Amino acid sequence: MAVRAPQLYRSLRLFGLASFALLSQEVEAGAEIPFSFEEHDGGKRPLYEYRPLVRTYVEARAGRLAVLPDALTALEELRREPAAAIYARAHAGGEGSENGALVRTVLLPLLTAVAEGCGGFDWSDEVFDRAYGELERSLFGTRRAYAAVAPLVGLGAGSQIELGRGIRVRVAAAGELAAHWPDAVRLLPPSFGREPDRVCVLELERPLQAAEAEPPDAPGELADAVTALRLATSAAVAAGPVLFERLDWRPYGIRPVLPIAATQPPGEPSRLDTFRGKLARDLLERIASADDDPELAEGLDRWELSLFATEPYRSEQLREALTALLGGTDGLWAATVRTALLLGETARDRLDHLERLRALTAGEPAKPSTLDAVRRALVETLLHADRAALVAALDESLLGLRARPAAFLTAVA
């Protein structure tokens, strides 16, 4: 077999041999490898396969394997290899060392792949060469396939919904997380996979160039997607509490989702249909540029914080959100008038909105309809793209100089 990094090949092979020796000695001493029986269709009589669960066995001994002299040598070779830099940046809970990241993302997956290919701990050079070849293709290929997956709660979907920027909502495949991350079961939200609003995942997929040594900011990007889904559906949506990363279909890391996206607000679950999916996609595109407009970003943050607050703090957050969004230097009163004009299709609608928002301005607790009005104002402002131009158009409309700016939505249920 032709290899691109002979020293790396040799050090990883020696690590594999030393690990197999340690693991097989423990088996001979009485340690038991867990196993499963898998049933296959055999016609009239089903066929059963005995499959050792070597991954569980190997990962339970990760600490001892990581301090083997051959493991330290292999880690040194990996640190010398620029192509392995992205693996050293992997995250997993509080583990911050490069060695720990390389053990999780390279050494243990390679060892597990060889052990599974051998059906235990009887070494085979052919199996090792095949597993090493896959690792080299990942290390030295021109592109890598990165993905991050977070459990989604509060929202169901009948089909895959693309949100743009490589992000989608889809139904989770049975056992897909546990297949790569054995600890996934204890990290999932309660009842995940068993309730209609807890069967989907939020997934980010992105190709990476070989020269990229840092993974994408998956927590930040998925948090933006959660914000877009909350705006589009008005549902009690959350993702997390953690996201699971993979690189070239290998387990890469486990990272916490940002707290505001991982916490489920009070409210009812909902279902993501095609219309709301397109709305969420459009909103996510606009949210990505909100950092260029500090007042818009402030309005979004205040509204999202209000979802978790109780009175009187919830109403205070809503007042601040409105002021930042459409008030500016003119203050909250101007924001309420502009919002009423923006949302009301008829004179009667505009009056209803104005009365509702005036009550908020006067210090009264926000009603659910008030919270929804602020949400819709954010949706309309984001869809108009240019917030300053929208404010100017609303003011001209109030003075009778032009028609009211067309609303993108008459209602977002």
Image (cartoon, rainbow, N blue to C red):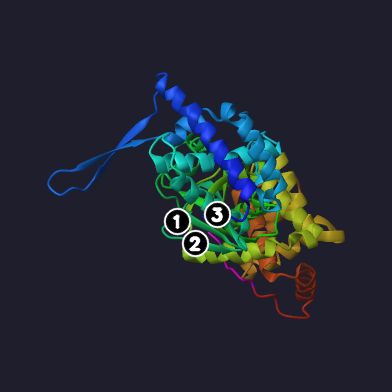
For the residues bearing labels 2 and 1, Cβ distance under 8 angstroms: yes
Badge 3: few (under 14), some or many (20 or more) residues near its Cα, within 10 Å?
A: some
Farthest-out residue, bottom: 402
The amino acid beneath tag 2 is: Ile
Vertical relation: 329 (above or below) 199 = below
Q: Nearer the viewer, residue 374 or 71?
A: 71
The answer to if 42 sits in the magenta stretch is no
Q: Nearer the viewer, residue 237 or 45?
A: 45
The amino acid beneath tag 1 is: Ala
Q: Nearer the viewer, residue 227 or 5?
A: 5
Residue 166 in the figure: left or right of residue 309: left
Residue lying at 51% horizontally and 55% vertically, measured from the top left = 1
How far apart marks 3 and 2 lie (CA) works out to 23 Å
Residue 404 in the figure: left or right of residue 333: left
Could you tell which of marks 3 and 1 lies nearer the N-terminus? 1
Residue 47 in the figure: left or right of residue 78: left
Q: Position of residue 320 (x, y in %)?
A: 77, 50
Vertical relation: 50 (above or below) 232 = above
The answer to if 408 sits in the magenta stretch is yes
Disc 3, SS = loop
* Residue placed under numbered mark 2 in the picture: 161
Instruction: Give the magenta range.
Output: 407-413
Dividing the picture into quadrants, the one containing residue 365 is top right
For the residues bearing labels 3 and 1, Cβ distance under 8 angstroms: no
Q: Is residue 64 visible?
A: yes
* Residue placed under numbered mark 1 in the picture: 157
Q: Position of residue 341 (x, y in %)?
A: 70, 67
